[in-house]
Image (cartoon, coloured by chain):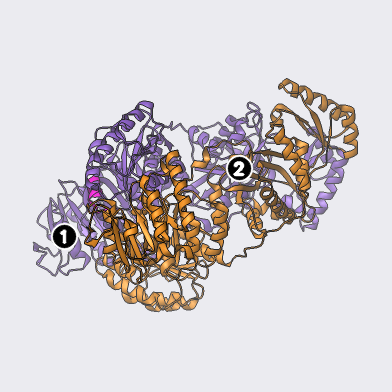
Chain colours: A orange, B purple
Amino acid sequence: MLRRLIPVFNPKSIAVIGASRRKGRIGRELLHNLIEYEYQGKLYPVNPYAEEVHSIPAYPSILDVPDEVDLAVIIVPAEKTLEIVKNCGKKGVKGIIMITAGFKETGEKGAKLERDLNRILKKYGISMIGPNCMGVINTNEKVSMNATFAPTQPLRGRISFMSQSGALGAAILDHADNIKVGFAKFVSLGNKTDVSGNDLLMAWEDDPDTDIILMYIESFGNPRNFVRIARKVTAKKPIIALKSGRTEAGAAAAASHTGALAGLDVATDALFEQCGVLRVSSIEELFDIAIAFSNQPLPKGNRIAVLTNAGGPAIMTVDALVGAGLELAKLGDRTRWKLEDILPEEASTKNPVDMVAAAGPREYEHAMKAILADRRVDAMITIFVPPIVTKEIEIAQAIAKTAKKYKKPVLSCFLGRTEDSPGFVHLTEHGIPSYIFPESAVKSLSSMVKYRTYLEREKGRPRTFKVDRKVPKRIFRKVAKEKRTWLAELEAFDVLKSYGFSTVRTEVTDNLEDAKKLAKKIGYPVVIKACGEGIIHKTEIGAVVLDIENEKDLVSSFKKMVSNVKKAGHTPDCILVQEMVTEGKEVILGMKYDNHYGPILMFGTGGIYVEYLKDVAFRVAPLTDVDASRMVKSIKAYPILEGVRGEPPSDVDSLIESVLRLSQMAVEFEEIGQMDINPIKLFEKGAGYKIVDVRIAIREC
Amino acid sequence: MLRRLIPVFNPKSIAVIGASRRKGRIGRELLHNLIEYEYQGKLYPVNPYAEEVHSIPAYPSILDVPDEVDLAVIIVPAEKTLEIVKNCGKKGVKGIIMITAGFKETGEKGAKLERDLNRILKKYGISMIGPNCMGVINTNEKVSMNATFAPTQPLRGRISFMSQSGALGAAILDHADNIKVGFAKFVSLGNKTDVSGNDLLMAWEDDPDTDIILMYIESFGNPRNFVRIARKVTAKKPIIALKSGRTEAGAAAAASHTGALAGLDVATDALFEQCGVLRVSSIEELFDIAIAFSNQPLPKGNRIAVLTNAGGPAIMTVDALVGAGLELAKLGDRTRWKLEDILPEEASTKNPVDMVAAAGPREYEHAMKAILADRRVDAMITIFVPPIVTKEIEIAQAIAKTAKKYKKPVLSCFLGRTEDSPGFVHLTEHGIPSYIFPESAVKSLSSMVKYRTYLEREKGRPRTFKVDRKVPKRIFRKVAKEKRTWLAELEAFDVLKSYGFSTVRTEVTDNLEDAKKLAKKIGYPVVIKACGEGIIHKTEIGAVVLDIENEKDLVSSFKKMVSNVKKAGHTPDCILVQEMVTEGKEVILGMKYDNHYGPILMFGTGGIYVEYLKDVAFRVAPLTDVDASRMVKSIKAYPILEGVRGEPPSDVDSLIESVLRLSQMAVEFEEIGQMDINPIKLFEKGAGYKIVDVRIAIREC
């Protein structure tokens, strides 16, 4: 446990400042919850207008409490909080839960109040949860603290949960109670003035009561810290996150391919994927998965067996399994012989094993034993559709009893029943994750497999290359000074070269005679491009001519191009003469600076259609070498780079290196706003790549 | 109602053959259900060993019943069914529900029994549901028939449901009861020997008790009939289908791009999309959507307003809305002024409208009125997170009362509550679809919008072109006779030409001298290809040379190519000399014959990487002109064909026509097994297209 959070989670005494005698008031319900949940320390209601609250002696001020106070829970009007927190400081209180709202969520005046509050906290070394929050729960038997005003008394469990929304937190306590899920700790984060989500992750990393961490968040305070901390935590216990506000980012228009494609919440996905956090998209899924993790061991692999007493639900389960990328286990012959001995003739002993409607507890037990003993099976889903005769409770008992004997996860689906039906309750009480529909069981198993894979995968290390930082520094400064957003073509190429990227040979001129000489020097075929203010979409206005094969073509193309550009209302500043690269596979590498997440990198299938094909992957910089390799290999068209239809493999290693160089550049130069390196022509293995075109924009920072 | 199904759904008298006195036996539970559900006709138990069953006089045989019998429900061992059905025929029974199992689902012996059974049915003109089924329910008050052995007595409602799985049907009745959803009719289809799913669709098309049709199916008896019938039905009432067995089709290996891509259940998706059936992927979703359709009007558009008393859940709802392709309604100024009058200062009057935690029934009512009156709003989701004070029942009353006053759909989410909580129950009882999580509400609304869009979209008509069927007929016969699977290149081109497709100019030879002459005739640049037995993957073995610019190149390429082919162990039969097409966008058109669905067509982004980019669309032939146009326009890269980045638009009309020609060919020649037309070079608008390459395989039929 983080030392500074001990007074918040394990206080020996609590003052409830603003404790109220009126039912329905927050100051009353919170005190009531503390009493009702049998808090194991001393309670001191503070209320200047009452001698006792809820049968406990009350004090007019925290300063009057005749004892040490570890934690103060504050429920007073916002304008009174500064003085009260000062008094807490004087009293030596080290933890505060600030329920009071009316701070930065209400506008500038509240924000100022919140800043003042924070200064007082820092002065006295107090840790504070909130403000504008619903409270904190620690179910540890030695503490037994429900310092919330939620109407639900939570069950004890091994899941710790943090919520950035108080209302959602209340709804979640309510839902958890309905489905009999317990918590170790629960925190409503509020405005996160002092204690952040990252602090809680650190606190729970080694908390012996916490096996699983759930979080509902709407924004990251510090995404980079989150990555660092979450990576450490997920190596020890799973984090399952519900992150909302997915569509917010989509609003901002963007001028680059990367910008246009990076709109839809890809950064959060990338972030979670990089640090092994399991993302879910609804509260329902959050709990479906949590109960699997908190009750069952991780599967060793992705080979799943399905045992059922009815065909239809098994087919649905297999559909969901295959859809989730899991495998239907192939049962061994011995397993099938054992099943044949137990089951009637009409049964199917092939996975999914369909015991048909007559199957009773004995069949469930023996079939489970045969299947779970098979080393080709990593996990199991048992399905039961209640027929008229068999008692569901007996089936549930057989499943729970048998599952305990094996170290493989068993999840159950009692189709169409309710959470209150007797079989369901028995399973839940005996540690078998139970679901009403098979899709939920499959989703949970697939998350377990995903987490297992994450635990096993190499994490890699960051790589830093020797680069020349002076060139980009000078160029970015110049561009900023000239109030430009976009770098000129040659500037952009120079930035790339200084970071060790390989680019096509590019020369610059402003006249035809010179162009002829440069073309000869570079060697035909060449490409010419007109550059200058406003000449952005070159293809559209005819400001680029590809594949010029000889001097005669060069002359006519040069003239035509200049006239095209003028017709479009521009005057070229200069003309680029470039080597024409015909070979190679086209890929794109890009970057976009997100105000929240920092630099987001993109890699994908390249060319001018990239925005339509959308075969791209995103990561948040910085990347490790393994991150970069996984990123490159994650796009749909990756097999093409490995070589298909008789083609030789491409130089993927050089590509991965270029991703790492871009990651380094993006981190070292935060002034880069967006960047499209498109296309990169990737050659055969060993032959590297060449960048044909690049656009770089800087941002204000 | 289909005339022949009247005895099944509206019988005036029922004989239960195999009625049993023993509790827990199907023959007893079924009779019990009929009595318990208060069947409005006469019941005749038939049992040779009992004088009365369940207090009703019993008869030894159907022939002994002293009255007319409309419907016989049969629960006897399979081997006795033939005689009993014969007797039913003699008695004049016109409907049978055959519960008995042990027919084709058990193997060849059972299949023969089933065929014999079918013959007897036909002879006597009897309609039969089953065998191997769970029974039939008709909740119409004048009939009130629960002829199933399920342990649940269904509520009355306006949803009719058919299930191909008996067990799933039972689970669904159970689940529906838990969430208080009622049915009009319920049918467990069983083996579908006589009455099929299509028959039920026709029966329910004009059934005044049925507003919505739900189906769980594992296979289509006759997919083409399904399309025809479902198109008619969905024009009148929604069909919501859960089709399992999605992954089955994926197993078959395929030698064409189309075959490889068409594996994953795309045919079912295509089929449903073509006839407006809404597909869901779980029972949960099936009911979430059904309760929305059965209680609320269809929205006029996709602009959704969200009203909430807490921020977090609203963000989640907006995420889900945008993710589902719905729009967040922009509220008019007047609406926002009205909201400002009603709501406290901290509230947000921008959609999502957040009334903050203090909102009571009055706020809900007035805010709903303001929002629902706004013509920029097509539908509404109201969210409520129970805070400590407000009574949820009052909120529920306000929502239900207000929603009734407007002709716009209102869906509710009482976050984290249970289906039994008082507010939830009030809403459900008053016709407001209620969900525990906002994602379910969004999914339901999005299905309603989808159905509305389907209803409004033009259906189009099939187009038939004048073609020459003699050529393909001759070629397919020849290929079959020679026991070949694949057509030779020239044969394939001839087939295409006979159907009016436009192909690149192609000549054939077996020697270099001739090739020179042909190349000159066609005009350089040309392409040469080696053809012959076993030369399939031409690119890989160097059996194709592109872009030959002159005779000198032709000579060297020709020799090199022949030697390549020999090195690969083949002998070329002939050499194709083709016009080289450099212009044009590459698309692919394909076809695969599915044993179940018939010809499946594919269209997509072309070239050799089609399998990796997977930007393809599928439809089941035959297509209407509107189908073809929608298919072409549905791929991700379609904007490229319309012209992006200054490019002129492509000749999409000619492409749509070629899709229709392919559809016609696929229907007229069922011997075509698979076909890749890849690439098609599509030129600028008005300039048509040219097919560069085609592979056609025939199948045994």
> Quarter of the image holding residue A508?
top right
Q: Position of residue B57 (x, y in %)?
A: 8, 62
Based on the picture, tell me whether residue B423 belongs to the magenta stretch: yes
Query: Residue visible at 54% across and 57% down?
Result: B252
Q: Residue A470 versus residue B84: which sits nearer the camera?
A: A470
The residue wearing badge 2 is A613
Indicate the chain on which mark 2 is placed.
A
Q: Which residue range is magenta in the image?
A: B419-427
Q: Is residue B236 visible?
A: yes
Q: Amino acid at mark 2?
A: Leu
Q: Which residue is mark 1?
A: B62
Magenta region includes residue A375 = no
Badge 2 crowding class, 10 Å Cα cut-off, few under 14, some 14 to 19, many 20 or more, is: many
* Front one among B567 and A390: A390
Res. B184 visible in picture? no
Gap in angstroms between the C-alphas marked 2 and 1: 67 Å
In depth, the one of A272 and A679 nearer the eye is A272
